[in-house]
Amino acid sequence: MKKGHLGLPGRAVAVFSAFAAAFTGLYLRVGYLSHSPALLEAAQQQKKYTLTISETRGAIYDCNYAPLADTRQETVYAVMPSPENLLAVLESVPVSRRTAVSDLMQAGKPFLLRGASELEAPGVLEFSVPVRTDSPQLAPHIVGYLDDAGRGLTGIEKSFDSYLSSFAAATQAVYQLDGLGRGISGLEPEVREAAEVKAGVVLTIDSTIQKIVENAGSRGLEKGAVVVMDPSTGEIKAMASFPSYRPDNLAQAVSDSENTPMINRALLPYSVGSTFKMVTASAALEQGLPIDGVFNCTGQIDVSGQIFRCHRRSGHGEVDMVDAMMKSCNPYFIQLGLQIGGDSLLEMTKRFGFGETLPLAQGISGSAGTLPGESDLQNPAEAANLSFGQGLLTASPLQVTRMMAAAANGGVLVQPRLVLGTTSDGRTLERAASVPGRQVLSAEISAQIRSFLIHCVMVEEEQNALPSNVSAGGKTATAQTGRFDENGEELEHGWFSGFFPAENPRYVVTVLAENSGFGNETAAPVFAEIAEEITALGL
């Protein structure tokens, strides 16, 4: 072998030694890099970013388990910004929104895009998500709405906030961000789908009847309220206040100080007027005063020097109790009330639940209204006022509905109910405790009062309350308020409260037309329309 040359075994050893040295150097380099402060910091900066697509909570159902919230779906897009989808994303939104969307694209983080037209592009995922509050929302004064953090602010959303929140669930997309906090294009996110929430609160409201009421009221009432109740159970089948409001436009509703659309007029106290005459008649019958006792109405009556006038200034002539109820003769009921006596009339008023707060759910209750005191009724003029529902007496439409239910159901004063209970599966009910009604009239007197009210609707055409397809009973009212408009005309509330069918009442309906004048012209036609539509649907 020549000097300076290696044989084959020697060259193999040299190659192996060089490879081993290189591998050792690489190993040491990797070890160094794995402990490099700069790279450790960059690795720590890489993190996951969770984009919440939608959040749900417990459901709010009507009495038939139809949802009153989360009633429709909307399409939203999860966008991972990239040069490849920039143009498609910008073109999917109106020009007025493109600057804001462009800023989100430049920020580089994934974001949620709502209100976009159909969008299909790389890095964009489409989701169909429930909308908690519809627009327009059915029964907004009852259902309520949420704040930006998803907490209940009003209505059932607030009353049951803790319970509904306990079922909170979210659909999320989890993205990987780079060391600069920007999304890594091309990496698909992990999508976590929320399970469908079936548990929730079950209300007494029937959504079909609620729609009928809202449609009829919006056509016939500028301001006012409607309550529909099952007279046997006290369950509220519909309750609406007018004008209504849209939870998706709260700024407009809050700024409307003239119409105050966000208050629930069904729960507020108003002067009652002649709907109250059934209470006076009940007290008279209980004392044994004759139905056929005749009074001559001359158009006015003098009570200790104070003149009370009838709405018919020429008078009704001779009327008995049935005639007086049909014609709504004030002087007749004034003299009847004076015969009964102020203390006895006040006792009957309280027996019918006037002056009681009516709780429906936590934070939701009907006002107690106001009553004259015993000392007030020592004044014959104040007793006269109470006899036909005027003076110091005020009550909510809910209270008047409860009063009318006692005539319709055999003399039982029911406890109004808005909440049936809860459900864990959207099909079965865990019923809430109920408060039993109390007998306030004998069945005989209740039947007699009911017959008076049937005469009012079925015989007295001027009431304008007779539905075309079902029998009914009830009473109009035109209640003075003691307030006047810019022309010096007194503002008056129009009322109608009644029941149908007349022979076996299934529903009691009260209509208040606030500051709108005669009840037979404003409130009674709304009652007739509601009764017709409910009957036509066979509900």
Image (cartoon, grey):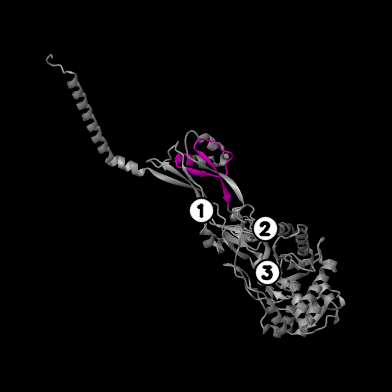
Where does the magenta region start and end? 104-131
Amino acid type at circle 1 is: Ala
Q: In the rendered image, which quarter is residue 57 located in?
A: bottom right
Q: Earlier in the sequence, mark 2 or mark 1?
A: 1
Per the rendering, the mark at residue 234 is 3
Task: Determine the CA span between mark 2 and mark 1.
Answer: 26 Å
Residue that protrudes farthest toward the right in the picture: 317
Tell whether 510 sits left or right of 71.
Answer: right
Residue that protrudes farthest toward the front in the picture: 9
Q: Position of residue 301 (x, y in %)?
A: 81, 80
Q: Position of residue 471 (x, y in %)?
A: 81, 65
Q: Earlier in the sequence, mark 3 or mark 2?
A: 2
Q: Is residue 365 visible?
A: yes
Task: Determine the CA span between mark 3 and mark 1.
Answer: 35 Å
Q: Which residue is mark 1?
A: 169
Relative vertical location of residue 78 with respect to residue 197 in this rendering, above or below: above
Q: Which residue is mark 2?
A: 207
Q: In the rendered image, which quarter is residue 109 located in?
A: top left
Disc 1, SS: strand
Q: Are marks 2 and 1 in contact (CB under 8 Å)?
A: no
Q: Quadrant of the C terminus?
A: bottom right
Tell whether 176 sits left or right of 366.
Answer: left
